[in-house]
Amino acid sequence: MFDKFITLMLSRDEEKGATAVEYALMVALIAVFIIGAVQFLGGALDGLFRQIGAAI
């Protein structure tokens, strides 16, 4: 009985670990996307803000 309980608890921990890895991969992918978007749009936004500042 105790062996079945230990086996159940160990298999449960593996699922939590896999879920944590999946969330970490998703967060890393989102961070890479945000960094890429900021770098891609950074120049355009800088030009836009400079035009607005010059107009003011």
Image: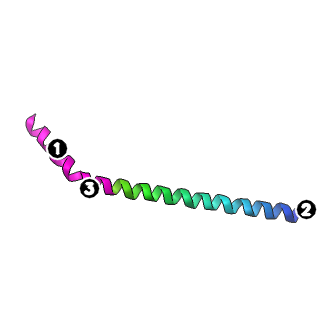
Horizontal side, residue 21 vs residue 36: left or right: right
Question: Would you call the spot at circle 3 few (<14 residues within 10 Å), some (14-19), or many (20 or more)?
Answer: few
> In the image, which disc is placed on residue 1?
2
Secondary-structure class at tag 3: helix
Q: CA distance from mark 3 to mark 2?
A: 59 Å
Q: CA distance from mark 1 to mark 2?
A: 69 Å
Q: Which residue is depicted at the point 16% across and 44% down?
A: 48
Q: Which residue is depicted at the point 85% across and 63% down?
A: 4
The C terminus: image quadrant = top left
Amino acid on which the number 2 mark rests in the picture: Met
Question: Would you call the spot at circle 2 few (<14 residues within 10 Å), some (14-19), or many (20 or more)?
Answer: few
Q: Which residues are magenta?
A: 36-56
Please tell me whether residue 51 belongs to the stretch shown in magenta. yes
Give percent across and percent down for residue 17: 63, 61
Vertical arrangement, residue 39 with respect to residue 49, above or below: below
Residue with the mark numbered 1: 48
